Image (spheres, rainbow, N blue to C red):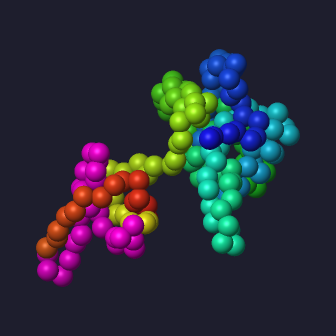
Amino acid sequence: MTTVTLPTCMSETQHMASTPMAQWYVLHTKARQEKALAQSLDAIQVRYYLPIIDQMRMHGGRKTRVHMPLFPGYLFLHGSRDDAFASDRTRRVAQIIEVPDQQGLTEELNNIRLALSSTQPMDPYPYLKAGVRVVVRSGPLQGMTGYVESRRQLDRLILKVEVLGQACSLEVDGAILDVLD
């Protein structure tokens, strides 16, 4: 169900921790520039990881399968500081984020790589925490906004009425929630 359509720094036979001098950098890309940035990095032989998934989308009343980044707006670069600066010169990068826990990110990306190589379907899931303002994306409560109270199997969504100083709550599946800024 999932495929990786672009060359990545990780293949099934490569281990994520390769060169001792190489570090992980998270590249926050400009809007919809992940794949183009990956191609630019591939052209200058800079190692990166861009997890890609297949999703069904509606276009013109028809369902089509599209290849989407698992983490929209982000690409993981594995290289030197100079490689990170070279990526910035592509004009596709909004921000270079340094990673303080290199080993932790390596393990997390390895988990993502293993999950993508399996036959299990994988979908983006919002990383929610208490106090985050969200909107319900689909279902009978579509368009409702509120605040997340806790992260469990079902999330508790708090609906506030500020002028009254009152609130109520309901349980919602976190998979249908989008974080609002």
Question: Please, is residue 67 above or below residue 61 in the view?
Answer: above
Q: Give the quarter of the image for residue 64.
A: bottom right
Task: Decide if residue 4 is in sight here.
Answer: yes
Viewer-side residue, 95 vs 35:
35
Whether residue 94 appears in magenta in the rendering, the answer is no
Q: Is residue 39 left or right of residue 141?
A: right
Seen from this angle, which residue lies furthest right?
43
Drawn side of residue 14 relative to residue 137, left or right? right
Residue 111 point in image, percent of width and height: 52, 29
Residue 153 highlighted magenta (yes or no): yes
Q: Position of residue 140 (x, y in %)?
A: 35, 70
Query: Is residue 73 something that shows in the picture?
Result: no
Question: Residue shown at 66%/72% (left/top)?
Answer: 61
Residue 112: give x, y in percent of width and height. Answer: 54, 33
The total of numbered circles placed on residues is 0
Q: Nearer the viewer, residue 63 or 177?
A: 63
- Is 27 situated above or below 158? above
| Relative to 176, residue 44 above or below | above
The residue that appears at 22% across and 62% down in the rendered structure is 170
Instruction: Please provide percent x and percent y for residue 130.
Output: 28, 53
Q: Is 42 positioned to the left or the right of 146 in the image?
A: right
- Which corner quadrant of the image does residue 13 belong to? top right
Which residue occupies 77% across, 36% down?
7
At a point 70% along the width and 26% down the height, the residue shown is 11
Question: In which quadrant will I find the C terminus?
Answer: bottom left
Q: Residue furthest bottom?
A: 163
The quarter of the image holding the N terminus is top right
Question: The magenta stretch spans which residues?
Answer: 139-165
